[in-house]
Amino acid sequence: MASSKIMFGIDLGTTNSSIARIRDGKPEVIRSETLKYTMPSCVHINRKQGVSVGDSAYRQMGEDMIKSFTTEGWEVNTFAEFKRTIGSDKRYECSNLGRSLFSEELSAEVLKQLKALSRESTLKAVVITVPAKFTPGQKAATVRAAELAGFEYCELLQEPVAASIAYGMEAEAKDGFWVVFDMGGGTFDAALLKVEDGIMNVVDTEGDNYLGGKNLDYAIVDEVVIPYMDRNYSMESILDDEQRKEQLRNAWKSKAEEAKIKLSLDESTDILSDLGEDYGVDDEGNELAVDISLSRKEYNELARPYFQKAIDITQNLLKRNNLKSDDLATIVMVGGPAYTPLLQEMARQQLTPKADFSNDPMTIVARGAALHAATIDIPYGVAEVNRAKVNLELKYETTTVETREWLTLKVLAKESDSVPSDGMFMVIKRNDGAWTTDRMKIGTEVELVELSLVENTPNQFSLELYDPKGTRLDCEPCQITIIQGFKHGQKGATLPYQISIEIHDDLFERDGLVPIKGLEKNKVTPAVGTENSYKTPVDLRPGNASDYVEIPIYAGAFFSEGTKAIYSDLVTVVKISGDDVPALVRANSEVDLTIKITRDEKMSLSAYFPCIDYSYEIDVEFSLDRVHTAEEIESCIAEARSALENIYDETDTEKADRILKDLDDLLEKFQKARLNDDNRLQTLNSLRALQREIDNLEKQVEIPRLEERLRNAYAELENLIQKIRENSDEETLNMGKIDASMADHKNKLDRLIKDRDRSHQKLKLMGDLAEEISAMDMGIRFALAGRQICVNILKEYAAAFDQLDWSDRAKARSLIQTGLSLPPDAEQREFMTIVIQVNALLPYYQQHKLV
C-alpha cells in the first residue's frame, strides 16, 4: 500500500499551543479562531457539559478563579497549565462533568481544537512536540492524549529539536555548536547541538520541567499583589488558611500574566481591579481592590532568579561538554520569555552575544514540527487506500544537504484499481515551476529519477500520472517534499535521562540506583541496556505468587549512580513472582537483565535466570508519577537537612552552608503554596538537585571512613593469621593460598587508597574489597571453629529474639531451638545450614529487591 507523509506538527504548550502544516513546501502556522498564531492551552466545561478551548476558555478562567475566592462553594470548571502535571496521578475535579480529569484528558481537548483548526476531516497522524526533559511516563501520557483526540498515530519530537529544524532552514551559518534555549510557559529546555555540513545531531540536553513563565506570574502575585493586600487590608484569616490563600493566588494570576507581557514592551504597567468586578472582602468586610504600579525594574528583580536558573542550567550543560561561550555559533531563543528585555540582555552577557532573537519564538517549535512531519511516513495501518487512485511506492531521502536527490518509484498493482496494463507515463514538477522531468514511462517495475533541488528550502514536487491516451489519473502520493540544506542526523530520539534500576546497596545499607549500561543519557534510540550478575533476595517457587522479586526502573539524572530513588522519576516496577517461572529459583541466584527501548521510546524488559535457563519478558507499562503530599515534601527537605548536618564537620563547610541556605529558601518558598500540586512537583524537582549534591558530599566523607575500615579489616586479618602461625594451627589450612590472597588484597588496598577518585564506582570497589577481606576472615575462623561460631550466632539471636523483626517468628524460633539442640559433634555443615535459614528470615531479605 502507498504511504504518505504526516505533514502536520503541533506544539502542545503549557500556556499556549499551535498547529502548523506544510503548504506549498513551506511550514505554515494555522491561525486560531481569533486570528492569532497561538491558542491558550485552556479548557472550560460548562453546566451543559459543553467544552470550549482557547481564548474563550481563558477569559472564562479569570472569572472562574475570582469567583472561587469570592463565592463560597464555587466550583472551578476551567483548567489551564495542566501540562506540568501530565503523566502524574493528579486529577482535576470538574463538577459540571461529575468526575475528575487527568491532565491527558484535558490535553486531548486542546488537541481536538487544534485538529479542528486544520480543517482536515481525515487528519489521523501528527507530530507533537514535548520538552526534552519529559520522562517516559510524561511522553506516554502525551501519546494517550493524542489517542483520545482521535489521532491514530502520533510521533513525538523534542521541542529544542523542532526549533533547531525551523531555525536551520533559515540560518546562514550551517556549522558549529548551537544551543537551543527554550523557556516556555511551564518548562525550560537547553539543548546542545552540533551541526556539520548542514547535518544536525543532538549532543546533550538539560532542563527543568517546572521552570517557565508560570513561575514569573506567581512571583508577581506572591511578591507584589499579596504583600500589597496584606499592607492595606486585614488579611490574617485569609493568608493563614492555605486553601483560601491558594484561591487568592489563582484569582490574581491572570492579572499578573497580563502585567508581565506588557512589561516586555513598556517601562511600567498597572495592576488594577476591574471596575464593577467583585474581588471579595477582607476580615473586616472591606472590599478588596488593587491599584499597583509595577515598573520593569521591579519586575526584573522578581524575574532575574528564574532567568538566572535557566542560564545556570545552560552554562552547566556547556561545562559538562567542555565548551565555552566562544565555542558557540549561535543560541536559538524559544518561548514567550524570549521577548523579555532582561532575558535578552542576560543571555547575551552570560552566554554569548551571538544569541539570536530574529525567529518568532512563539511559533518556531510548531514550524519545526511540521517540517519534521513532512519527513515521516504515515504508517500503513493508518493511511487509507483510495481505490479510485493508483497507488505508488516511493523511496527517497526526505532531508538532504545535497542539491540532487534520487527518487525510486513504481506502481503497486495490488493496491490500485483500473491500472492500465501498459503505457502509463508520469511528469514530475517542482512546485516553483523552474524544473520538470520529461514524460517517462511508469509501471510495476522500479523507475529511477534524479530530482533537482533548490538550496536551503523545502522542495515540493507534484507527481502527475497519465494513462496511455493522456488522461490524468489520480495517484497517491501525488506530492512529496524534500528539505534541502539542513538535516537531522539522528533517526531516533535522544534519551534525556539515565535509565537505572533500584537495588539494595550494601555499602550505605539502603536502596540506591544502578545505571543500566547502554541506556546512558544522550544515547539515541533504539537502544539496548544490560546489567548482569545481580542476585535474587528470595526463593521463587513455581506457582507461588507470594514469592516475588521487584525491579523498579527509574529515569534518573546524569549522575544518578548510588542516589536515592525518590530523587529520580519512576518509570515502572516490574514484579516477577513464582507464577512467572517454570522451575525453582533459589535465593541468591544470578539474574541478568536486558532493557530495550525502541525508536519511539517504548520499553521492554527481559530477566534471564541462568540457573533454570529461562527468560521472563514483559513490555513495560509506564507508571503515573505520584504527586506527594505537602507533609511528605517537608519531610524530604528535613531529611536532606539532617543528612547534611550529620556530615557537616567532615565536609566542605562553605558548600554545606550554601546547600543549607538553599534548603531553607526552598522550604520557605514551598510553604507559600503548600496545597498547590504544581508547586509540590516543582519543589521536589528542585530538592532532587540539592539532594544529589548532598549525596556527593556523603560519598566524599564515606571514602576516608571506608579507607579506615579497610585498613582495620586487613590488620585484623593479618593478626589472625599471625596467631594461627604462633599456635601452629596451619595444618588445617592452605597457607600458600592464604598468603597469595593476602598479597592480592594488599595490592588492591594500596591502589584504592592511592587513587584520589571520589566516584561511586570507587566506593563500590572499596566496599567489595572490604567484603572479600571479611569473607576470608570469616572463612578462616569457620575452618578452625565453625561449630562454635554458629552456636554463638544462634545464642545471640535467641537472646535478642523479641527485638528482631522476623518474617516468620514461629519458624525462626523453631530453627534456633533446633540448632542449639544439635550435639557438639554434629557436622559443621548442619550448623551452617541452620544459620543461613535463620538469616533468611531477617528484615534484609524482606526487601524483594535485587542485591
Image (spheres, rainbow, N blue to C red):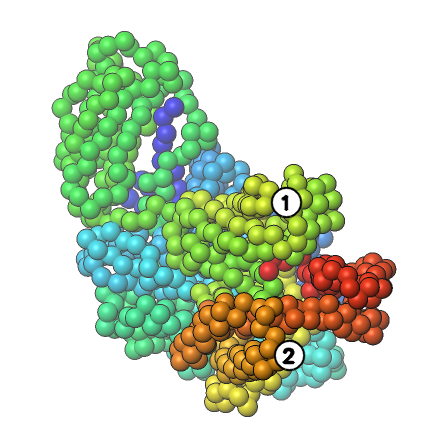
Q: Quadrant of the C terminus?
A: bottom right
In the displayed structure, does residue 386 sit left or right of residue 146?
left
> Measured from the top left, where is residue 194 in percent x and y?
27, 59
In front: mark 1 or mark 2? 2
Query: In this view of the protein, which residue sits in the foreground, 291 or 78?
Result: 78
Q: Amino acid at mark 2?
A: Ala
Quadrant of the rendering where the N terminus is positioned: top left
Neighbour tally class for label 2: few under 14, some 14-19, many 20 plus, Cα within 10 Å:
some
Position above or below: 292 against 570: below
Whole-number angstrom distance, CA of label 1 to CA of label 2: 46 Å
Image location (x, y in percent) of residue 601: 46, 47
Q: Earlier in the sequence, mark 1 or mark 2?
A: 1
Q: Residue at x 46, y 70 (%)?
A: 740
Callout 1, which amino acid? Gly
Residue 306's place in the image compared with 832, above or below, is below
Tell me where residue 234 appears, x and y as whole percent: 70, 84
The tag on residue 164 is none
SS under mark 2: helix
Mark number displayed over residue 638:
2
Position of 560 with respect to 239 (left or right) is: left
Q: Is residue 113 visible?
A: no
Q: Nearer the viewer, residue 430 or 39?
A: 430
Q: Pointer 1 and pointer 2: residues touching (CB < 8 Å)?
A: no
Judge from the rendering whether residue 463 lies leftward or rightward of residue 795; answer left or right.
left
Which label is found at residue 50? Answer: 1
x then y, percent, for residue 76: 67, 59
Q: Residue 134, relative to residue 418: is it above or below? A: below
